[in-house]
């Protein structure tokens, strides 16, 4: 039986099919639903400056370089706070931390509402923008929490849906901005819509979610994950997928404005499309990875991302707005697909390592949960730093060349490296574990990660 005390679940064993079918699945799906809601609003608040900068015309006195720097710093904070947010789930409980992290979103929202007017200094905007970065942390705590609720065979779908539902907060706030700009409203109207939604998300999490007593901070697991080469390899691959998604989400509208002279309304008409499709496709990436293997899906996804980027370079050089917009939206879709497949790989990799160590059954599952849970926060944080790099690359490209072409060339090279790493580590056979460097080569396990 599942004992509860103050919304705490004392026994949780999703790998036990009888338990899962009788009570576990219903509880896990309910927690997933309200986790998605809170994470969704967190993403909206994190990326609200991608929208607010579209409102900030010449009267605000900010250059394009200032705006790219502002969004870069917001992305940076969102990446850094993912690490403590990951450990907060075990410290406070998944439900409790969801309530707290949702309520904290009021701070950047109210602060932005107070300062959003011409005459405010750039340093003030930068400080308030940094506060919005805490919205990026909601992803890490939400993914860590949901990872504990679902069995391995369902993780690709569950984590993909959780992340996709959160990611869709990006196009939703951009759509809201489009409606408000079209109606002649200002940025404070947009913020005024989100402040009560934050309160609703926190209240619903308090009423409907659960804490898992079995989820505990394991400092040994964190150290083991940090020492494991797979954590850093997957962090790099996640830079290529999620880093691209969040970086482009912040930058797309600004690129349209600065390179193609689009007005705020014209930019808003198309800015939301890419993040929307990229978010919706993320669960598909997880499901495809469940069926065909995350490494295979990730490999060919990087090929497609490279091809889309090459088209963007051509469109940028030819100043073709139509081709540029279509190629950028396709690239967004591919980042979402890759987000789902890379995150599915993480628990599978550590399960494969458990089998290589001779573990089976629940022991192997526990080993996989322990290291995958510990690594997810670090991977999510490092991956989000890709968004910082993208915005800084665009800033430098516009300063140096007056367009984003130089940045796209750099991104193409990055995707080529991601492809090579995915093939070399997870698909080339036999795959030698890139860990345990003190083990003699002849003693290292030979195993394939092709199905992770």
Image (cartoon, grey):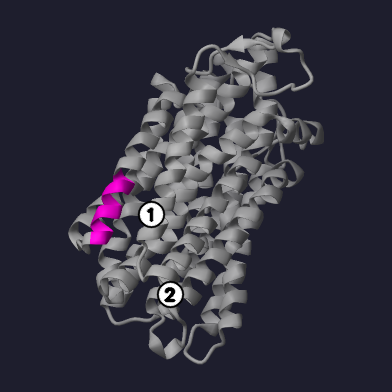
Residue at x 26% of width, y 76% of height: 182
**For mark 1, does the 10 Å Cα neighbourhood hold few (<14), some (14 to 19), or many (20 or more) residues?**
many
Q: Find numbered disc 1 in the image and state the secondary structure of the residue it sits on.
A: helix
On whether residue 376 falls in the magenta region, the answer is no
Q: Is residue 165 left or right of residue 12?
A: left
Give x and y (percent) for residue 202.
58, 57
Residue at x 27% of width, y 78% of height: 183
| Observer-nearest of 191 and 429 | 429
Residue denoted by label 2: 53
Q: Is residue 47 left or right of residue 288?
A: right
Q: CA distance from mark 2 to mark 1?
A: 22 Å
Give x and y (percent) for residue 312.
29, 53
Q: Main secondary structure of the magenta part?
A: helix
Query: Is residue 424 visible to the viewer in this orientation of the structure?
Result: yes
Q: Which residues are magenta?
A: 308-317
Contact between marks 2 and 1 (CB within 8 A): the answer is: no
Quarter of image, res 11: top right
Q: On residue 408, which mark appears? A: 1
Of marks 2 and 1, which one's residue comes earlier in the chain?
Answer: 2
């Amino acid at each position: 039986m599942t004992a509860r005390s103050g919304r705490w679940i004392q026994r949780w064993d999703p790998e036990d099919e009888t338990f899962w079918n009788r009570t576990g699945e219903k509880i896990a799906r309910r927690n997933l639903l309200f986790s998605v809601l809170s994470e969704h609003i967190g993403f909206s608040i994190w990326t609200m400056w991608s929208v607010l900068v579209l409102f900030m015309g010449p009267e605000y006195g900010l250059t394009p370089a200032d705006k790219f720097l502002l969004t870069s710093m917001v992305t940076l904070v969102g990446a850094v706070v993912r690490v403590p947010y990951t450990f907060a789930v075990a410290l406070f409980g998944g439900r409790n931390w969801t309530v707290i992290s949702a309520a904290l979103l009021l701070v950047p929202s109210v602060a932005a509402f107070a300062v959003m007017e011409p005459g405010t200094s750039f340093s003030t905007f930068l400080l308030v923008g940094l506060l919005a970065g805490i919205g990026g942390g909601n992803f890490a705590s939400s993914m860590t929490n949901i990872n504990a609720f679902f069995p391995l065979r369902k993780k690709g779908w569950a984590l993909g849906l959780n992340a996709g539902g959160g990611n869709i907060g990006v196009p939703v706030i951009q759509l809201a901005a489009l409606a408000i700009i079209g109606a002649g409203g200002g940025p404070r109207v947009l913020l005024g819509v989100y402040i009560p939604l934050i309160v609703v998300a926190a209240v619903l999490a308090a009423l409907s979610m659960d804490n898992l007593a079995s989820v505990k901070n394991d400092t040994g697991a964190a150290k083991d994950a940090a020492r494991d080469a797979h954590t850093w390899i997957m962090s790099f691959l996640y830079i290529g997928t999620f880093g691209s998604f969040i970086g482009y989400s912040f930058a797309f509208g600004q690129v349209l404005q600065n390179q193609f002279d689009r007005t705020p309304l014209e930019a808003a008409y198309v800015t939301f499309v890419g993040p929307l499709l990229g978010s919706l496709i993320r669960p598909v990436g997880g499901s495809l990875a469940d069926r065909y293997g995350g490494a295979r899906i990730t490999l060919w996804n990087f090929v497609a991302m490279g091809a889309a980027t090459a088209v963007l370079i051509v469109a940028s050089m030819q100043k073709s707005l139509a081709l540029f917009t279509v190629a950028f939206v396709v690239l967004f879709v591919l980042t979402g697909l890759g987000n789902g497949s890379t995150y599915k790989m993480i628990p599978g990799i550590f399960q494969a390592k458990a089998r290589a160590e001779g573990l089976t059954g629940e022991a192997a599952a526990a080993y996989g949960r322990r290291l995958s849970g510990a690594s997810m926060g670090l991977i999510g944080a490092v991956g989000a730093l890709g968004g910082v790099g993208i915005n800084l690359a665009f800033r430098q490209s516009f300063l140096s060349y007056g367009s984003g072409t130089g940045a796209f060339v750099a991104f193409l090279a990055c995707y080529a490296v991601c492809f090579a790493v995915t093939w070399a580590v997870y698909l080339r056979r036999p795959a030698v574990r890139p860990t345990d460097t003190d083990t003699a080569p002849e003693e290292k396990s030979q195993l394939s990660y092709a199905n992770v």
